[in-house]
Image (cartoon, rainbow, N blue to C red):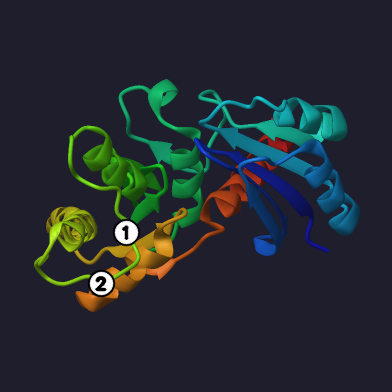
Amino acid sequence: MKERVLTLDIGNTAAKVSVFEGERLLECNSSGTLSEQDIECMVRRHVPECAVSCRVGEDSRGLEDFLERGFGNRYLRLCPSTPLPLDVEYDSRGSLGADRVAAAAGALSSVPVLVVDAGTAVTEDLVADGRFLGGNISPGLSLRFRALNGFTSRLPLVDPEGELPDFGHDTVTAIRAGVLRGLVAEIRGIRDMAERRLGNVKIILTGGNADILARLLADENIDADVDHALVGRGLVRIFNYNDNYDDNE
């Protein structure tokens, strides 16, 4: 029987707790106010044998310590020194976000992959031949809309949902088209650079804005898969790699 693993991903604006059986997602709960009680409820429902976490935001509720107390030596906290099932080609692993590492592990496959994590920030990372080859970071959709509103005297805060012409015919549609189509053009350009280097590249979208980006990319005839469990699945792979690593020492 495949082991059940609880994963915790603490981001900049929300935390996500999931339970996997093998690499199959059983349940996920994402919230800006995730609590110990939320985790306890999931543990009671699924009875995971082990847990693993990564964090880029502040753990103000002490959720990682809560997991460590509950799972003991069957808990892994992803850090820069954690052994990984992939090679990381980055000047300083300590400055590489743990969520990017986990997403890269989740994306490991037989073909090159461009992992686009569209959250508070947008990260576009290239994974191929068992290696993390680096990537780019830019503002996420919400940051782009808020920056135009916050750093100008007259531009409004625009919702991403709504009319989306090729070229805006008023201020609202001009901002929406500029932000959304600008990000699509960014992803297309990075995909093109990756393919000049590696040949055909598969795009995997994850993060809070993955679905809206998938629709926009499809409108441009750009294929992209959406995988909201990518980081959690990568954490499972990292946990299992370390479990086997410890057994072989």
142 or 169: nearer the eye? 169
Compared with 160, 98 (above or below) is: above
Can you give x and y, in whole percent of width and height, for residue 237 in the image? Answer: 60, 49
- Residue on which the image places disc 1: 112
85 or 224: nearer the eye? 224
Which corner quadrant holds the C terminus?
A: top right
- Residue on which the image places disc 2: 163
225 or 144: nearer the eye? 144
Is disc 1 in contact with disc 2, using a CB cutoff of under 8 Å?
no
**Between discs 1 and 2, the one toward the N terminus:** 1
Residue 222 occupies which quadrant of the picture? bottom left
Residue at the spot 68% in from the left edge and 39% down from the top edge: 52
Residue at the spot 49% in from the left edge and 40% down from the top edge: 99
Left or right of 63 in this view: 103: left
Compared with 205, 12 (above or below) is: above
Is residue 137 shown to the viewer in this render?
Answer: no
Q: Secondary structure at mark 2?
A: loop
Residue 45 occupies which quadrant of the picture? bottom right
Is residue 39 shown to the viewer in this render?
Answer: yes
Q: CA distance from mark 1 to mark 2?
A: 35 Å
Q: Secondary structure at mark 1?
A: loop
Can you give x and y, in whole percent of width and height, for residue 247 in the image? Answer: 74, 37
Identified by mark 2, the residue type is Glu
Identified by mark 1, the residue type is Pro
